[in-house]
Amino acid sequence: METIMDNSTMEFVQQQTPSTLISTIQQLSYWKIFVTFICIVLVWDQISYQIKKGSIAGPRFKIWPIIGPFLESLDPKFEEYKAKWDSGALSCVSIFHKFVIISSTRDISRKIFQSSKFVKPCVVDVAIKILRPTNWVFLDGKAHIDYRKSLNGLFTKTALAQYLPSQEQVMDKYLQKFIEISKENNYEPQVFFHEMREILCALSLRAFCGEYITEDQIRKIADDYYLVTAALELVNFPIIIPFTKTWYGKRTADAAMKIFEQCAQMSKDYIAKGGKPICVMDAWCKLMHDAKTKNDEDSRILHREFSNKEISEAIFTFLFASQDASSSLACWLFQIVADRPDILEKIRKEQMEVRNNDMSTELNIELIDKMKYTNMVIKETLRYRPPVLMVPYVVKEKFPVTPNYTAPKGSMLIPTLYPSLHDPEVYENPDEFIPERWEEGSPASEAKKNWLVFGCGPHVCLGQTYVMITFAALLGKFALYTDFEHKITPLSEKIKVFATIFPKDDLLMTFKKRDPITGKVFE
Ligand code: HEM
C-alpha cells in the first residue's frame, strides 16, 4: 500500500530525522556501534567480492570473511593450485582486500603476458625495499623496454660463450665436492637439495662476476641466499622489523650488492686496460666502453655509463631471478635422469661423441650446440616440471581479459604456465617423461605457443639461453665423470612449492667417481 504524506508531514519528518538519528546513535552503546560496523564491513566484503568475481569460477562466497583462504596461502600445495586451474579458464580468490584472478589456458595466459598496456609484474611490497626502488626490474613500459635492450646483449649466445670457461671450473670443483660428500656418507643417499642450490649459486656468481668475486664471498652469498627467498614469500609483513625474516633478507641483499659494486669497479678498470670479457660484468663494461668511441647514437644511449650501484642492483636481480628457478630445474633434472638409466646412457653416449672421445676437450658453444639429446632431456624436464608455475601481474587499468570478463583495476592477475605445458593435445601422455617428443619437426617442438616455461612478451626471461647452455654443460659433465643414484621414496614425484617447485623428499642422492672412457666406477 502506498503512503501519501502531505507537505506539512514531509517538513516535520525532514526537521526531525537528523536529530532523531543523532539521538538514536547516542542511545547506542559502543558495543552496538562496533557490531554494526563489523556487519557493514562483512556485507561489503561479500558484495565487493561478488561484483569483482562476475561470471568466473571461484567460491560462491568468501567462506572465511575478510581473510579469504589466507591460511591456506601460508602453506601452498600443488594439488590445490591444480584444482584451481582445473576449475575454469579464469578463476578467482580474494585474500583480505586483494582480488586474485588466475588464468589457466594458454591463450589467455599469453594475452596477459603480452598486454603491458593493462598489466605490469606484481611483486610483494617488501621486494621493492629488498631489491631497492631504483632497481631496473620495477621499470614499466618504454623505460623497461629500453633498459632491457641494454641488457639483452649480455645474454646472447656469443656473450654466453665467453663465460663458459669460468663456469667449467665451478662444475669441476663441485663434481669433486659431490663425490667427497657422498664418500663421507659411505655413499648412502642423502639430501642434496642444499648442494644443488649452492652449485647453482656458484655457477651464476662466476658467470656474472667472473674472478672479481672470491670463493669466500660466493660461499657466503650461497649460504645466506635462502634468507632472501624467505623474505620474499608471498605472505610476509610489509614493514621491515629488526630480526624478522624480511630484515635478514634485506641485510643479505645489501651485503651481496656491496660485493657486486666492488666487482663492477674492478671490471671497469680491467676493460679500460683492454681486458677481454669473461663474465657478464665485463661484457657490460665492454659495451659501455665501446659505445663511447662508436659513432652510433643508439648504442651510446643504450650503453651509457651505468654506475657501479646500478650494475650491482641489476646483477642482484639476475641472481634473484635465477637462483630458485635454476635450483628447481637442477633437482628435478638429476632425479629424473638418475631414475631412468636408459636416458642417462644415451646422454653419456652423446657426450662422448660430441667430444670425439677426447676428454681434454674444453666446453665451448659449438660443443654444446651438438648436444641434441641432452638438450631434449633438459627441455622435457622444464616441460614436465616447470620451475615457475605462475607469474603474478597487477592490473594497471580495467582489462577486458575475455569478451565476458573485465579484470578490475588493482586486482592481481596470474597467468599460469603448467597447464599449457601439460596440454594433452600438444604433448601426448603429458604426465610421462619423454625426451624424444622434442625431435625436430615433432608436434611438441612445433607448438611454440605452448612453450611458456620462460613466460613471453616484454618481460620474457632474460636468462633462457643461459639456462639451456649452462644445464647442457652441467648435465653432460656430471653424466661423464660421476655415477649418480637417486633413492626413490613415495614423495620423490610429489611436488613441494617453495617459491618454485622441488621434489617433496628434498632429493636423496649419492655421487661416485666415474671414468668417462671405461665407465668404471670408483668407491
Ligand atoms: C630454469 C630457470 C629459469 C626459469 C624457469 C625462468 C623463468 C622465468 C619466468 C617465467 C619469468 C617471467 C617472464 C614473464 O613475465 O613473461 C622470468 C623473468 C626473468 N628471468 Fe628467468 N627463469 C630462469 C632462469 C633465469 C636466469 C638464469 C636468469 C639470469 C641470468 C633469469 C633472469 C630473468 C630476469 C631478469 C627476468 C625478468 C625480466 C624482465 O622483467 O624484463 N632467469 N624468468
Image (spheres, rainbow, N blue to C red):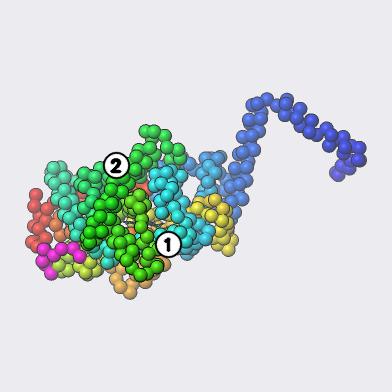
Q: Is mark 2 within 8 Å of ligand 1?
A: no
Say if the magenta span includes residue 361.
yes
Tally the marks: 2
The foreground one among 194 and 120 is 120
Which quarter of the image is occupied by the N terminus? Answer: top right
The foreground one among 405 and 384 is 405
**Percent position of residue 230, x then y:** 36, 42
Residue situated furthest bottom in the rendering? 441
Within 10 Å of the Cα at label 2, are there few (<14), some (14-19), or many (20+) other Cα atoms? some
Q: Which residue is labeled 2 in the image?
A: 224
**Distance CA(mark 1)–CA(mark 2):** 33 Å
Within 10 Å of the Cα at label 1, are there few (<14), some (14-19), or many (20+) other Cα atoms? some
Q: Is residue 182 left or right of residue 299?
A: left
- Residue type at the position of mark 1: Asp
Q: Which residues are magenta?
A: 356-364
Quadrant housing residue 273: bottom left
Relative vertical location of residue 16 with respect to residue 125 in this rendering, above or below:
above
Q: Secondary structure at mark 2?
A: helix
Relative vertical location of residue 343 with respect to residue 489 in this rendering, above or below:
below
Quadrant housing residue 466: bottom left
Quadrant housing residue 473: bottom left
Tags 1 and 2 touching, CB below 8 Å: no
**Percent position of residue 387, x then y:** 35, 54
Q: Is residue 78 left or right of residue 19?
A: left
Residue found at x 64% / y 38%: 40
